[in-house]
Amino acid sequence: MTDDRPVVLVVDDVPDNLVLANALLKKHYKVTIAANGEKALAIAQAEPPDLILLDVMMPVMDGYETCARLKADPLLKQIPIIFLTAMADSEDEEKGFVLGAVDYITKPLNSSLLLARVKTHLALKKAQDSLKDRNIYLESEIAKRIKEVTMLQEVAITAMASLAETRDRETGAHIQRTVHYVRELALYLRDKSIYEGILTLENIYLMTKSAPLHDIGKMGIPDMILWKPGKLTSEEFAVMKQHPAIGKRAIDGAEKLLGTSESFLRFAKEMAYSHHERWDGAGYPEGLVGETIPVSARLMALADVYDAIITRRVYKDPIPHDEAVAIISAESGKQFDPVVVTAFIELAEHFKVISETFQDAFPVK
């Protein structure tokens, strides 16, 4: 039959004290004994007890040093230690409490007092262990739920982006490239402590995941306009300019299904609706100016235009990287946020590598 009673380790250099303590405790607890501090440490490390009764006055290693070494061990520091002492000096008691002891019992031992104190502190330890286990369980459950929610977010965004990509086949790997461009710009600005209230690591993660949805509104544009091989007429361009509003409505609808108007899709909505705004106010759909344009949309605006410049489209040939950099630079303070343009210039070679790494899988006809 398994003995699952709590284990009490009694440490004392006087054999009579060990015999007495064992006699008082053995009816209720499993008792192990040690005649000195070194032996106590070895026993505790081999099989940690539930509570330790520790004599203060011992040769070689006294109770205080033994207590300090027990508390320094991560596996033993939570074991409650009750000092056994013939001293009644308050300074000695204070020293023991500072080292981590939970109580003092003076010698000669009073059987009723000893049993009551041991019972109390074992009950407290049991409650603390239970709370610790509960907290570990809750932390594990929270981590699991966070992982599940994150996966659901990624699945939702990926599904919506994949659907959008099927409607805009001419851009090929455009979505992959713009994701990397946005990430590079955001991380660079964060490292420079620019827009630090917005460009937190969590927000950058969401922006990166949301970037593929910036053109989701094109799903609502007729094929004859979306895939027209030549220049759009003014009437056709007016229809094309509706895609930011269409994208915003689509994401608004998704958020309503989630039962909220502010969700992990907030940056997707900002990018979809405002990435055609211009720093000088000449953009669309609202003609926003400067700082009124969301930061995520400013990043996407530059990323989107750079990629459009260097990529072959049905209506144009690609323009070399160096010329694209010059075109973007000339639009600083006009089409683009000057701060974002400065970051782009610093990262220009990174952009070139990204564009070469994620090339279109098929030629544009």
Image: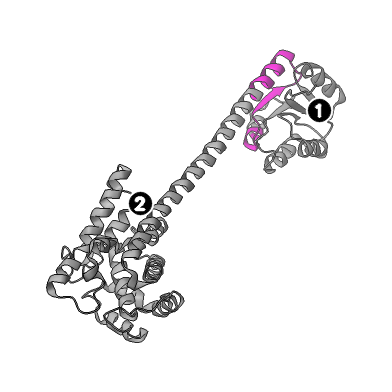
Determine whether the residue tagged by mark 2 lies in a helix, strand or loop: loop
> Which amino acid lies under the numbered mark 1 shown in the image of this protein?
Thr
Quadrant hosting residue 271: bottom left
Residue 3 percent across, percent down from the top left: 77, 23
Q: Is residue 79 left or right of residue 189?
A: right
Of circles 2 and 1, which is in front?
2
> Which amino acid lies under the numbered mark 2 shown in the image of this protein?
Phe
Q: Which residues are magenta?
A: 95-121
Q: Is residue 15 above or below residue 301?
A: above
Numbered badge on residue 32:
1
- In this rendering, does residue 293 appear at all? no
Extreme residue toward the right, this view: 15
Question: Disc 2 marks which residue?
Answer: 264
Extreme residue toward the left, this view: 235
Residue 340 percent across, percent down from the top left: 31, 71
Please report the residue visible at 71 percent of the width from the left and 18 percent of the height from the top.
114
Q: Is residue 329 above or below residue 201?
A: below
Determine whether the residue tagged by mark 1 lies in a helix, strand or loop: strand
Quadrant hosting residue 223: bottom left
Residue 85 percent across, percent down from the top left: 74, 26
Extreme residue toward the top, this view: 112
Callout 1: 10 Å neighbours few (<14), some, many (20+)?
Answer: some
